[in-house]
């Protein structure tokens, strides 16, 4: 298991896509973001090694996040492919009225249970 420093090891890595949505127009941007996610979800599910895909929505801070989790040993292969369909998803999200602050992040995950 990879170890960042003593006691900080991990066996899974996540790639997160995130942005802010707007409550205007009866939360239309949130609705369209969900439709976009559903459009690319089959491709994300087909990524070799995917163990989890989580969508997080916060109504208070207006976050929309998608986290795709893979075993550490499989993550590099997806990274070499540009995290497809990441760019398609983010490009389409950027065209939705009310979507802002589009970002990505890679981070490790370790269960503490």
Image (spheres, rainbow, N blue to C red):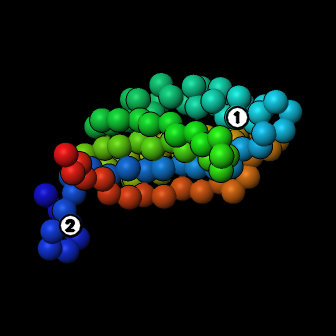
Q: Residue at x 39, y 29 (%)?
A: 46
Location of residue 52 in the rendering, given as x and y in whole percent from the top left corner: 35, 35
> For residue 98, what is the image quadrant?
top right
The Cα–Cα distance between marks 1 and 2, rounded to whole angstroms, is 36 Å
Answer whether residue 72 is visible to the viewer in this image.
no
The extreme bottom residue here reads: 5
Which label sits on residue 8? 2
Answer whether residue 98 is visible to the viewer in this image.
yes
In-image side of 37 versus 27 (left or right): left
Q: Earlier in the sequence, mark 1 or mark 2?
A: 2
Location of residue 72 in the rendering, given as x and y in whole percent from the top left corner: 25, 52
In-image side of 102 versus 6 (left or right): right
In-image side of 13 versus 63 (left or right): left
Location of residue 17 in the rendering, given as x and y in whole percent from the top left corner: 54, 48
Mark 1 residue crowding within 10 angstroms, few (<14) / some (14–19) / many (20+):
many
Q: Where does label 1 land, which residue?
A: 30
Q: Is residue 104 above or below residue 70?
A: below
Mark 2 residue crowding within 10 angstroms, few (<14) / some (14–19) / many (20+):
few
Location of residue 39 in the rendering, given as x and y in whole percent from the top left corner: 59, 26
* Of the pair 24 and 100, the residue shown nearer to us: 24
Q: Is residue 67 above or below residue 5?
A: above
> For residue 67, what is the image quadrant?
top left
Q: Residue at x 47, y 25 (%)?
A: 42
Q: Residue at x 43, y 50 (%)?
A: 15
In-image side of 7 versus 98 (left or right): left
* Quarter of the figure that contains the N terminus: bottom left
> For residue 50, what is the image quadrant?
top left
* Of the pair 47 and 58, the residue shown nearer to us: 58
Q: Secondary structure at mark 1?
A: helix
Q: Secondary structure at mark 2?
A: strand
């Amino acid at each position: 298991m990879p170890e960042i420093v003593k006691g900080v090891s991990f066996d899974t890595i996540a790639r997160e896509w995130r942005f802010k949505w707007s409550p205007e127009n009866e939360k239309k941007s949130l609705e369209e973001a969900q439709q976009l996610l559903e459009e690319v979800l089959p491709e994300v599910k087909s990524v070799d090694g995917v163990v989890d895909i989580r969508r997080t929505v916060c109504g208070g801070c207006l976050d929309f996040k998608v986290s795709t989790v893979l075993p550490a040993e499989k993550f590099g292969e997806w990274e070499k492919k540009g995290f497809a369909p990441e760019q398609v998803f983010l490009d389409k999200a950027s065209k939705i009225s009310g979507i802002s602050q589009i970002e990505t992040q890679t981070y490790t995950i370790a269960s503490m249970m």
